[in-house]
Image (cartoon, grey):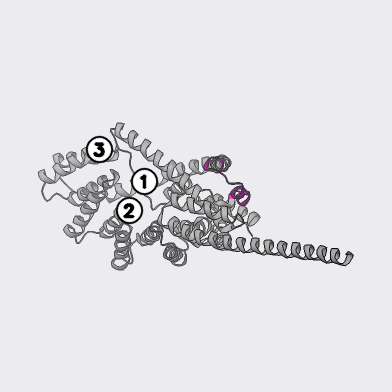
Amino acid sequence: MKKAALCLISLFIFAGNSFGQILTEEGATQKIIAQKESKELYREAILLYEEGNLDKAILLLGKSLKLDPDNKKAGLLFIEALLKKKEETVKAKEEALKAQEEAKVEETEEEEEADTAEEFLKETLAKERVDTGEIKTEIGIVKEGPGLKEVEQEIEGEVAREEELKKQQAEALELEEKKKREEEAGKKEAAQPEVAAPKEEQDAYQLAMQLKERKMYGEAIAHFQNFLKEFVGSAYEEGVFLAIAESQFALKEYAQAKSSYQKFLSDFEKSKQLDYAQYMIGKSSEKAKDYDQAVLDYLELLNTYSESKFVVDAQLGMANSFREKKDYRQALIEYQKVVDFYPENKAAAQAIFSIADIYDHTFEVRDYKRAVLAYGKVVADYPDSLFVERARQRKRYLEENYL
């Protein structure tokens, strides 16, 4: 009887162990399946993210993390998608407000040249996304299942910490812009044709130029066009054609500006400003967000006017256009050409900073080591650049948190 009882007890113990083992194996199998499904959802989310479909990408990433909370790649992309969604929402609101303000303004503000380092830095600081690395609890936050509100709070905290730096940069920008405007005014004054034109003709020309200088571009264009009709064959004709194109560009009428610059090329084949007109054709395409055409226009200048003083700006504009097209690898190549071929030009500082910024903030080609090296080059080689303070800050942050 004792033997029978012992056998029965042993049997129960064996069965219990076997059942426990089965449950353990079944749990492990389910976990593997969940991890596999999580990875598949993550891959689908990447494609949606790259296509700009943030809502669906966020949805799939949320499901991916629910299946596997330890999927760090999905967690990082989830936060990045939320940040980008936040950025797009803010940008849409800003554009709506800007449109309302512009409807009330009678005089259009002159648009600053985007090829300058000053304008580029303004745009970078204005639209720069706070990197996911700056949210130190990123994986922990994802595991807890945050909403957009929590992420927004993190962003606002980071923005507040950078506000003082932006203020300092803005003050430096104002000084640089003032200096640039004074230099350009001097160049234009020196470039005015010295002609013995009748007083009536001189007065008409000066009136139109004064309207342009006062940023009354619509009125200036009308006066310039009347001038061309009234004073056919005037010695001022070349300058008038350019002034019309420049005024259209300032009014953000990029298609009209481009057409005017192209007409200038065909009508004034012996002009010494053909390279400038070709450069502005590229700039007009870039501003109109026709980046494919902008690349071709800038390439035309590089091939046709290889000795032009606008070659560096054209090379930089081509790099910027590739970046806007999201062809980041080609953009890196074009920026590097600016650094390699024109290391003494101030555009080189902007180019190397752009390289660092792409490696730092662009998900598709992110490489923190290369970003740190590029930021370090800005600090070491261009200590007087407007980009140096931002480069120093990002370099220090990446070294402390990622390297």
Point out which mark residue 211 bears.
3
Q: Amino acid at mark 1?
A: Glu
Q: Quadrant of residue 161?
A: top right
Q: Nearer the N terminus, badge 1 or badge 3?
A: 1
Instruction: Determine if residue 184 is in view.
Output: yes
180, above or below 365, in the image: above
Are the residues at dot 2 and dot 3 in contact (C-beta closer than 8 Å)?
no
Q: What range is drawn magenta here? A: 134-150
Residue 66 position in % (x across, y down): 57, 52
**Mark 1 surroundings within 10 Å by alpha-carbon count, few (fewer than 14), some (14 through 19), many (20 or more):** few
Q: Amino acid at mark 2?
A: Lys
**Mark 3 surroundings within 10 Å by alpha-carbon count, few (fewer than 14), some (14 through 19), many (20 or more):** some
Residue 337 position in % (x across, y down): 43, 66
In the picture, the quarter occupied by the N terminus is bottom right
Write down the residue under mark 2.
Answer: 289
Q: Nearer the viewer, mark 2 or mark 3?
A: 2
**Mark 2 surroundings within 10 Å by alpha-carbon count, few (fewer than 14), some (14 through 19), many (20 or more):** some
Q: Secondary structure at mark 3?
A: helix
Write down the residue under mark 1.
Answer: 112
Instruction: Determine if residue 352 is in view.
Output: no
Q: Amino acid at mark 3?
A: Leu
Q: Secondary structure at mark 1?
A: loop
Name the residue located 62 percent from the left edge and 53 percent from the top edge.
396
Q: Nearer the viewer, mark 1 or mark 3?
A: 1
Overall secondary structure of the magenta stretch? helix
